[in-house]
Amino acid sequence: MGLHGKAKNFLGVLLSLFNQSKNLRKRYPPASSTCRTTAAQELIERHYTPTSSKTLALDLGCGTNPRNPFQANELFGVDIRSDLARNISKADLSIEPIPFNDNTFDFCTAFDFIEHIPRNSYPQGKPRLAFLELMNEIHRILKPGGLLLHCTPAFPSKEAFQDPTHVNFITEDTMPLYFCTPHRWATGYGFNGDYELLEQRWTDNAWLIGLMRASK
């Protein structure tokens, strides 16, 4: 290969690396705090004004201690564990619906949970778009104008991949483009809800924290 050919090949490699790097850039800004709890609270304070009305919150994948960052009057949870009590219901949300009625909750939270819901599942041998159905279910149980707060390790951070129980990898474009107005690209796959993205930020350079409002 001559000098011209080597230069051309080198420029081609540089161009390829440049184009690949665009996929690693983070277009959404970092939160002011690297503490996920603090960062989530900052989003809430910017977009939610506490009310004197009675409010209900649901925490998904809550374990034995549901979180209540919105300070709702009544708190419920859903988890896959079998040793739960109080207001916590048992359900495998990769194959089952959220076990609550339509338009029940003012708030829904999902801390380090979405990454554990597979894109596809096969309950009783039947295909199910589990992640998409979860987003449908959250929309269903939220009241009109209800808020979804999620905190999820996301691409390109290694935290999205290193845990072997993580089976769903999202990017900073997943929620805005597929589940939120005006795009809602997931409607082509059976998504029938609608969210408004209020704010989305990175925290600790690894987790996406997003606040979304259910439009009904």
Image (spheres, grey):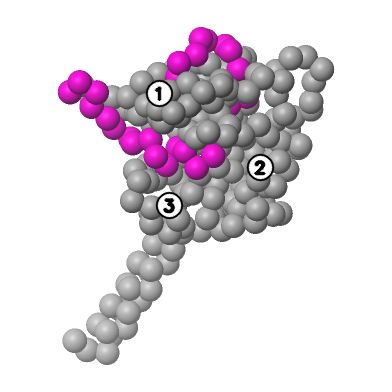
Relative vertical location of residue 168 with respect to residue 126 in this rendering, above or below: below
Q: Is residue 113 magenta?
A: yes
Q: Amino acid at mark 2?
A: Ala
Mark 3 Cα-neighbour bin, 10 Å: few <14, some 14–19, many ≥20: many
Task: Tell me which segment is drawn in magenta.
Answer: 98-125
Nearest the eye: 48 or 18: 48
Q: Secondary structure at mark 2?
A: helix
Question: What's the distance in space between the residues labelled 2 and 1, CA to CA?
Answer: 25 Å
Relative vertical location of residue 35 with respect to residue 176 in this rendering, above or below: below
The residue pinned by badge 2 equals: 40
Nearest the eye: 67 or 10: 67
The residue pinned by badge 3 equals: 160
Question: What mark, if any, has residue 167 been given in the picture?
Answer: none
For the point 20% across and 21% down, the residue is: 124
Question: What's the distance in space between the residues labelled 3 and 1, CA to CA?
Answer: 24 Å
Q: Amino acid at mark 1?
A: Ala
Q: Secondary structure at mark 3?
A: helix
Relative vertical location of residue 14 with respect to residue 5 in this rendering, above or below: above
Task: Give the mark, 3 or 1, whose residue is nearer the N terminus.
Answer: 1
Residue 130 x/y as whole percent: 34, 28
For the point 28% across and 24% down, the residue is: 128
Q: Is residue 179 magenta?
A: no
The residue pinned by badge 1 equals: 91
The residue sitting at the right extreme is 52
Task: Give the mark, 2 or 1, whose residue is nearer the N terminus.
Answer: 2
Task: Give the mark, 2 or 3, whose residue is nearer the N terminus.
Answer: 2
